[in-house]
Image: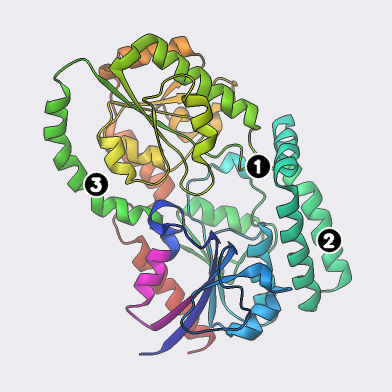
């Protein structure tokens, strides 16, 4: 069996891969292990070994121990680089640009649910204010990453003119698009979830032969898990019919952390929703808040919840399909792949839009698969008549095909086949 050494990147060392977008990377790595004697090395922003030297017994290394990505390549000599962060994020771009100059194959996986509207260029005060707030809250970390990128570009032999062009693009692109990805050449191989993304990358100047449609790898686990959950839901639903309890799950989205909102907007929504639920239902409502497993912190929501209802449970890490199945109704805001799980499990989905945002950028609202609530009065109304909310199976199937292309549990296998073809053509 051939040996293969890969490098990939994530934020934290102590992070459960099953509870974040990194499940895509781990799924691919586990599938690659069936074909290669695989050695996976993880660069992390926080945590990891403080030693710059490669030690075979250590898997995690802090990327900021190195001056640039060329030092990483010199130390680890990888056969391939994997990333899910695209070519705009500074550390991911450092990897892609450096490897391009050194002829090391790279793979970028479009993993998660993105609306095409967020990638379009537009002049929007929301984008500008979102960027300003993001820089205000994360300025030091952004600068740290950008210095690493500049050092990498210089040490890789890029011309001063090309570096200046990169800097100029980095100044204006974030002000013209919510998601300014795929403006820097992408990876050697770009894996996307559906044909529309393939066309999008081609329009961005990425060669057709460097793009493969495989489906959404992170959904494979859900595909294999969903039928088990549905079977267990039958008995649970019977138990739930006894009494007058309402089990409400609030799924948050890191709108602040991604630069779409400021923290005041998020806090306002959480406060208004929780206050309304507490005032209208009291102890009848069992409220659970499921926050993002990577980008959000429990303390943010605990500060609001403790003043309203001490019984509110805030969960960062848990099996999301199980939480959904145990709920009578799910409330959310923004857009996330978690909402597909809500619909697949036939639960009513209510999305908050208190700020009158463009619903056309939200497929769940655009396709009328979720209920839009613009105020707390509408929210309570729909909770009261939640049993009338029906899921259109044909429309759901069409949406899944549009977004995920194939929901068949084999996306990871297709991705690995594409990666193997790249590796064989490049080196083996």
Residue 346 lies, in percent from the top left, at 26, 32
Q: Residue at x 32, y 56 (%)?
A: 220
Residue 314 in percent (x, y) is at 41, 35
Q: Say which label, 1 or 3, has the lower sequence index.
A: 1
Marks 2, 3: nearer the viewer: 3
Residue under label 2, please give it.
165
Residue pointed to by mark 1? 178
The magenta stretch spans residue 422: no
Mark 1 lies on a secondary structure that is loop
Sequence-wise, the earlier of marks 2 and 3 is 2
Q: Residues within 10 Å of mark 3 (few under 14, many from 20)?
A: some
State how far apart marks 2 and 3 are (Cα).
Answer: 47 Å
Give the residues drawn in magenta, as a range: 26-41
200, above or below 377, in the image? below
Quarter occupied by residue 76: bottom right
Position of residue 161 relative to residue 228, above or below, is: below
Spatial CA span between label 1 and label 3: 32 Å
Snapshot colouring? rainbow
Neighbours of disc 1 within 10 Å: few (<14), some (14-19), many (20+): many
Answer with left or right where residue 396 lies relative to residue 196: left
Asked whether the beta carbons under mark 1 and mark 3 sit within 8 Å of each other, the answer is no
User: Considering the numbered disc 2 on the image, is that residue within a helix, a strand or a loop?
Assistant: helix
Q: Which residue is mark 3?
A: 226
Work out how far the residue at label 2 is from the one at label 1, CA to CA, in angstroms: 20 Å
Q: Residue at x 66, y 63 (%)?
A: 91
Residue at the image position 28 percent from the left and 16 percent from the top = 284
Q: Position of residue 101 (x, y in %)?
A: 70, 79
Considering the image in quadrants, where does the N terminus appear? bottom left
Circle 2 crowding by C-alpha within 10 Å: few under 14, some 14–19, many from 20? few
Q: Locate residue 223, reporting x and y percent.
A: 28, 52
Label drawn at residue 214: none
Q: Is residue 34 magenta?
A: yes
């Amino acid at each position: 069996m051939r040996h293969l050494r890969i490098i990939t990147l994530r934020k934290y060392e102590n992070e459960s891969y099953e509870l974040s977008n990194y499940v895509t990377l781990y799924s691919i790595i586990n599938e690659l292990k069936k074909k290669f004697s695989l050695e996976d090395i993880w660069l992390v922003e926080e945590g990891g070994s403080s030693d710059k030297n490669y030690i075979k017994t250590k898997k995690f290394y802090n990327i900021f121990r190195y001056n640039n990505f060329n030092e990483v390549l010199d130390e680890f000599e990888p056969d391939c680089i994997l990333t899910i962060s695209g070519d705009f994020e500074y550390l991911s771009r450092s990897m892609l640009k450096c490897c391009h100059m050194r002829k090391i194959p790279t793979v970028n996986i479009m993993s998660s649910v993105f609306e095409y509207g967020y990638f379009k260029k537009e002049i929007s005060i929301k984008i500008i204010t979102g960027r300003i707030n993001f820089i205000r809250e994360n300025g030091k970390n952004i600068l740290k990453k950008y210095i690493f990128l500049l050092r990498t570009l210089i040490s890789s032999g890029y011309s001063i003119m090309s570096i200046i062009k990169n800097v100029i693009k980095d100044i204006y692109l974030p002000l013209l698009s919510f998601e300014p990805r795929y403006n820097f050449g992408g990876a050697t191989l770009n894996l996307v979830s559906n044909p529309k993304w393939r066309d999008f990358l081609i329009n961005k100047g990425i060669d057709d032969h460097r793009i493969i449609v495989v489906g959404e790898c992170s959904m494979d686990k859900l595909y294999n898990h969903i039928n088990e959950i549905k079977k267990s839901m039958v008995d649970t639903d019977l138990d739930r019919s006894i009494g007058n309890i309402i089990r409400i799950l609030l799924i948050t989205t890191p709108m602040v952390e991604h630069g779409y909102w400021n923290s005041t907007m998020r806090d306002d929504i959480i406060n208004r929703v929780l206050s309304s639920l507490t005032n209208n239902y009291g102890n009848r409502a069992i409220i659970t808040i499921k926050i993002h497993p990577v980008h959000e912190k429990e303390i943010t929501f605990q500060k609001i919840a403790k003043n309203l209802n001490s019984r509110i449970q805030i969960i960062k890490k848990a099996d999301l399909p199980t939480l959904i199945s145990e709920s009578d109704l799910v409330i959310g805001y923004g857009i996330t792949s978690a909402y597909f799980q809500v619909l697949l499990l036939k639960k009513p989905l209510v999305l908050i839009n208190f700020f009158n945002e463009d619903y056309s950028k939200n497929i769940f609202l655009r396709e009328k698969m979720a209920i839009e609530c613009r105020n707390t009065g509408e929210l309570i109304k729909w909770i009261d008549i939640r049993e009338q909310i029906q899921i259109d199976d044909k429309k759901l199937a069409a949406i899944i095909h549009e977004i995920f292309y194939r929901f068949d549990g084999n996306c990871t296998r297709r991705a690995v086949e594409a990666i193997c073809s790249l590796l064989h053509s490049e080196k083996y």
